[in-house]
Image (spheres, coloured by chain):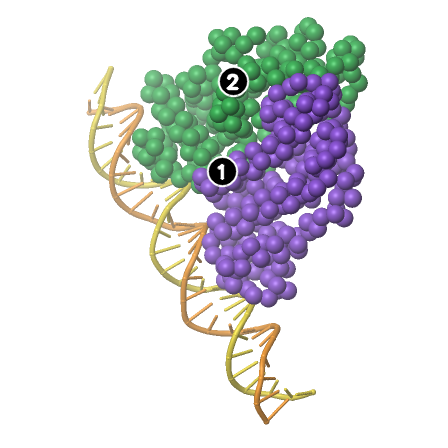
Chain colours: A purple, B green, C yellow, D orange
Amino acid sequence: MDSYSTFQQEFDLSMAALCGRILERHQATIRVRKADTAVPNLVRIIETTLALSNRNGFHPMSLRDLSEQSGLSMGALYSYFDSKDTLLLMILGQVVDAIGLVLTAPDVATGDPLARLRALMARHVYLTETMGPWFVFAFMEAKAFGKQGREMAVESELWTEGLLRDVIADGIDAGRFRPVDPTMVAALIKPMLQDWYVKRAKYRKRGVGPDAFVAVLVDLVGNMLRA
Amino acid sequence: MDSYSTFQQEFDLSMAALCGRILERHQATIRVRKADTAVPNLVRIIETTLALSNRNGFHPMSLRDLSEQSGLSMGALYSYFDSKDTLLLMILGQVVDAIGLVLTAPDVATGDPLARLRALMARHVYLTETMGPWFVFAFMEAKAFGKQGREMAVESELWTEGLLRDVIADGIDAGRFRPVDPTMVAALIKPMLQDWYVKRAKYRKRGVGPDAFVAVLVDLVGNMLRA
DNA sequence: TTCAAAAAAGCGAGCGCTCGTTTTATATCG
DNA sequence: CGATATAAAACGAGCGCTCGCTTTTTTGAA
């Protein structure tokens, strides 16, 4: 894992692939059986939902707006989900799914602590670069699903933080990092990673791409931890 | 400025004071003339709005919920604002107001770069500690006010980032910091500051208070920048 | 290969209801 | 009483969602 283009070859996170996963996970509620029909329509639905929600919020988006913008009728929409809440849950679930897929890949688990930390941060940046609107959506709308959504968000947050914390703790034990509080440092690296997708427009305007962002992050975190 | 308790003595950011400012700034729309009546009611309205919105979002919060929870009738509510959007704007405006008040205070402008950076970060943490729910609200709901809200948020974000960037640039010029990109470092300090209020519950659960958070932040950023 | 029957997918007006807002009525107090 | 503040009731627009119907696709015996 050394650059964004390598990452893109390793993981298929295209809209089609992601919506294919959604179709699998929600076979029970999606009434359209043929994948060749369902996947392209799901792509249209999800793309439009992300666009409208990330502009004004999920709740203000009416299903009539979604119908109009996506080109599917109200009736057609309701053969892909059985309630607006289910639509929200489909997207949140797919985000959690993708995090698990990408951040547990093998090469994050061995080798030099700084290299592992770099791999973890790079993976996070590349993942959120590919699925930007999904992550913005999850970040902003998790609470809209009430207690359950909040808990899902907190759990996912703590899981990622735990990956960072363990690598930092290993680095301290190995004498490669100075003796900081691993939990606090992990907790503070997380929001910097999140900034990449929350403030994506700002970085784009400044000409900072994913690889440049990772480079700065690794430099700063490296100096933060240097023994 | 050396601790949270000093900060609290220096700035009056009580609900009453903040709502007093709101009353001043919205004399045109608030129809209740007597401040002795208006301020306590505004406090109830704003407190309830922040509580309900930060749980489920501003848009999902109905004015009937707000009426019931705040103890004021629909009619009474509408003598304090002329639309739900105005209520949102009152809160956002007061947040911007408070940022300007606190972060431009004098002792942030002179002295050792690291001390100035510390003062700036400490002020930000203490401000957001005092006005936690206000900042969470502003962070999550700015986009609900459409283009205008988004631009207000971006402007405020860039202004704060600019304060950090200038101090870092001064530090580099003075040879006290290593030659990093001041804009990128400022951009990455900001989300760590924001994490204090966005994830406040997590830190509370871990027994990390504002002063401890500032200490960690200063330590990490100091090592990040050490020449 | 053909073509009607069956199955799948899509359509959109309309339902019940809740929303933000307005209007009307009542209470409080100098 | 008159002014001010609050409470209660009412309104129309727009919401999520449904359902009777149409269109498209697939099927399979001739």
Q: Is any part of residue B145 visible from this angle?
A: no
- State the residue at coordinates (55%, 45%): A92
- For the residue pair A28 and A104, the one nearer the viewer reads as A104
Placement of A176 over or under D21, stated as above or below: above
- State the residue at coordinates (71%, 16%): B223
Placement of A21 over or under B221, stated as above or below: below
State the image coordinates of residue A160 (x, y, percent, origin top left): 61, 35
Instruction: Determine which quarter of the picture holds residue A174.
Output: top right
Q: Is residue A65 toward the left or the right of residue B188 in the image?
A: left
State the image coordinates of residue A135 (x, y, percent, origin top left): 61, 41
Placement of A219 over or under D28, stated as above or below: above
The quarter in which the N terminus of chain B is drawn is top right
Residue linked to disc 1: A150
Q: For the residues labelled 1 and 2, say whether their Cβ atoms are less than 8 Å apart.
A: no
- For the residue pair C6 and B212, the one nearer the viewer reads as B212
Q: Which mark is residue B209?
A: 2
Q: Which mark is residue A141?
A: none
Q: Which SS class for mark 1?
A: helix
The type of residue carrying mark 2 is: Gly
The type of residue carrying mark 1 is: Arg
- State the residue at coordinates (47%, 54%): A83
